[in-house]
Image (cartoon, helix red, strand yellow):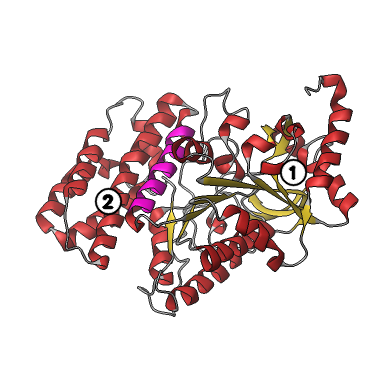
C-alpha cells in the first residue's frame, strides 16, 4: 500500500503499530545474543551509528562485536578510521606493542574523539586479552582514505628497511608533494591550475609495491600488506582531493569505494575463513539504494558490499535515538562540545520509534527487518548527525528519506542516549572537511 502526502498521519500510526509487533526489547547487554546469532550467518556484518559521538552506539557495537568474535568466528574489526592510526591499535591488540603502550596515540586528526574515546579504549583492552588466549587473533583495521601524508611516511619507513634503493626511488616520486608541506588544502588548491598533480607518481608507486615479494612468514607478510595499503591510500587520497576540486560530491563515492576496496584487501589477506565486522556511520553502511543518495548519484560501502557479495553474505545494522546528548563540533576543527540532541522531528522514524518504546515499555529494542511487513519499505525521514552539528537547525538538515527495510537488515533503537567520553589528544585541524553531509 502506497501512502499519499495527505495520509501522513495514517502512515505514522500504521508504522508504529507494525513496529510494536516487530520490536524485540532487551534489558541487559547479554540479551543481544539473539541479534548476534541472526547476524552471524553473514561473512560481513556492518554496524552503524546515527552520530559520531554517542556512548551507547559504541558500547552496543562493542558488545555485538564481542559476541561475533567469541561465539561465531569473526576475526576482523574494520572501522571508519585512518589506516596508520588503526595500525597502532592492531599492533597493540596482536601483542606487537608492549602492555604499557597507548593504542590510541595515533588519532591526531580532528575529530580525534571518534576513535580516541573510553569505549574504544575498553574494547581494545578486551581485544588484546582475547587475542592472548586465542589461536585465531582478531585484527583491527582502518578503512578511510584521509591519511595522505602519514601514509607516505609509513610507506617510506617500510621501504627503507626492505630495499633502500627502491625507497630512494619512491621518495623521489613522492617529492611531487614536497611543495605542499603536508597540507592537503594546499595540494587540493594546486589542482585547479595544475590538474595533472601527482596522479602518475602515486599510481606508479602502488604498482611497484604490488610487485614486491617477501618471505612467506606472518610478520613479513603483515608488514608488506600494511605498506601496500598505505601506498593504495596515497593513490586513492590523491584521487579524492582531485575529485573534490573538479567533481564535487563525487569525492564521497571515491571515499566509499576506497573503503570497500580496503575491506576486500583485508578479507583476502586474512584468508578464506576471514569474517569482518565494520563500524561506520549509518550513512556509510545503510544501503544507498534505499535512500535519496541513489537519486544524487552517491554510493556507500553498505550498498556496494551487498552488490558485490550478495545480501546473504552481508548484514547491515542501523542505529537510532530519539533524544539525548552527543559529542560534536559547531564547525570543522572547532572545539569539542557536549551538545543536546533535540527530540526527533514529528513524523520521523525516530519520533515514531519513541512512541513504540512507550508502547512496549522498553527504552531500547531492535527491529529484525528481514521479518518486517511491507510498510517498512515506505520512505520515512531518518536522522543522521555528523561530527559538525547545530542543534538549532537539526530539524532542517539532519534527516535522510529512507526505506528502512531495504536500507538495513536490523535496526537498533535507544530512546535516550548520552555523549561519548573523549580521551584528549593533540589535534591536527588542517585536514579538509568531509563534504557530505555535515562531516559524516
User: Which region shows up in magenta?
Assistant: 252-268
Q: Could you say whether the residue bearing mark 2 is in a helix, strand or loop? A: helix
Proximity of marks 2 and 1: CB atoms separated by less than 8 Å: no
Number of labels in the image equals 2
Q: Secondary structure of the magenta portion, mostly? A: helix
- Could you say where residue 295 lies in the image, as x and y percent from the top left? 58, 22
**Residue placed at 43% from the left, 25% from the top?**
247
Question: Dot 1 corresponds to which residue?
Answer: 391
Q: Which mark is residue 228?
A: 2
| Residue 253 visible in the snapshot | yes
**Residue placed at 60% from the left, 49% from the top?**
48
- The answer to whether 381 appears left or right of 153 in the picture is right
Of residues 168 and 140, the one drawn nearer to the viewer in this rendering: 140
**Residue 175 part of the magenta-drawn span:** no
- Could you say where residue 182 lies in the image, as x and y percent from the top left? 34, 47
| Residue 80 visible in the snapshot | no
Amino acid at each position: 500500500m502506497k501512502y499519499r502526502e495527505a495520509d501522513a498521519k495514517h502512515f505514522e500510526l500504521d508504522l508504529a503499530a507494525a513496529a510494536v509487533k516487530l520490536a524485540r526489547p532487551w534489558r541487559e547487554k547479554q540479551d543481544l545474543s539473539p541479534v548476534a546469532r541472526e547476524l552471524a550467518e553473514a561473512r560481513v556484518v556492518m554496524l552503524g551509528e546515527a552520530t559520531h559521538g554517542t556512548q551507547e552506539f559504541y558500547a552496543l557495537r562493542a558488545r555485538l562485536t564481542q559476541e561475533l568474535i567469541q561465539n561465531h568466528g569473526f576475526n576482523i574489526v574494520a572501522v571508519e578510521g585512518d589506516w596508520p592510526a588503526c595500525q597502532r591499535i592492531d599492533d597493540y591488540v596482536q601483542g606487537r606493542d608492549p602492555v604499557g603502550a597507548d593504542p590510541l596515540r595515533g588519532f591526531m586528526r580532528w575529530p580525534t574523539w571518534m576513535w580516541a574515546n573510553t569505549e574504544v579504549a575498553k574494547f581494545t583492552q578486551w581485544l588484546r586479552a582475547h587475542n592472548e588466549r586465542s589461536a585465531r587473533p582478531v585484527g583491527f583495521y582502518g578503512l578511510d582514505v584521509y591519511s595522505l601524508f602519514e601514509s607516505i611516511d609509513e610507506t617510506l619507513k617500510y621501504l627503507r628497511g626492505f630495499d633502500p634503493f627502491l625507497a630512494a626511488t619512491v621518495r623521489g616520486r613522492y617529492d611531487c608533494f614536497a611543495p605542499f608541506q603536508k597540507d592537503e588544502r594546499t595540494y587540493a588548491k594546486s589542482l585547479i591550475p595544475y590538474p595533472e598533480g601527482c596522479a602518475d607518481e602515486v599510481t606508479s608507486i602502488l604498482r611497484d609495491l604490488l610487485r614486491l615479494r617477501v618471505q612467506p612468514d606472518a610478520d613479513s607478510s603483515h608488514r608488506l600488506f600494511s605498506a601496500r595499503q598505505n601506498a593504495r591510500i596515497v593513490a586513492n587520497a590523491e584521487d579524492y582531493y582531485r575529485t573534490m576540486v573538479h567533481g564535487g560530491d563525487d569525492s564521497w563515492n571515491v571515499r566509499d569505494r576506497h573503503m570497500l576496496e580496503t575491506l576486500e584487501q583485508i578479507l583476502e589477506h586474512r584468508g578464506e575463513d576471514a569474517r569482518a565486522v565494520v563500524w561506520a556511520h549509518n550513512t556509510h553502511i545503510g544501503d544507498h539504494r534505499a535512500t535519496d543518495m541513489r537519486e544524487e548519484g552517491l554510493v556507500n560501502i553498505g550498498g556496494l558490499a551487498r552488490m558485490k557479495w550478495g545480501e546473504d553474505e552481508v548484514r547491515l545494522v542501523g542505529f537510532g535515538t530519539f533524544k539525548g546528548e552527543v559529542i560534536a563540533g559547531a564547525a570543522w576543527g572547532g572545539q569539542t562540545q557536549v551538545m543536546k540532541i533535540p527530540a526527533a522531528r514529528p513524523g520521523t522514524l525516530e519520533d515514531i520509534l519513541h512512541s513504540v518504546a512507550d508502547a512496549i515499555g522498553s527504552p531500547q529494542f531492535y527491529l529484525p527487518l528481514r521479518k518486517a511487513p511491507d510498510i517498512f519499505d515506505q520512505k520515512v525521514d531518518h536522522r543522521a548527525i555528523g561530527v559538525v552539528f547545530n542543534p538549532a537547525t537539526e530539524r532542517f538538515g539532519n534527516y535522510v528519506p529512507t526505506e528502512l527495510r531495504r536500507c538495513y537488515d536490523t535496526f537498533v533503537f535507544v530512546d535516550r542516549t548520552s555523549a561519548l567520553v573523549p580521551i584528549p589528544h593533540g589535534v591536527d585541524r588542517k585536514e579538509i572537511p568531509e563534504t557530505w553531509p555535515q562531516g559524516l
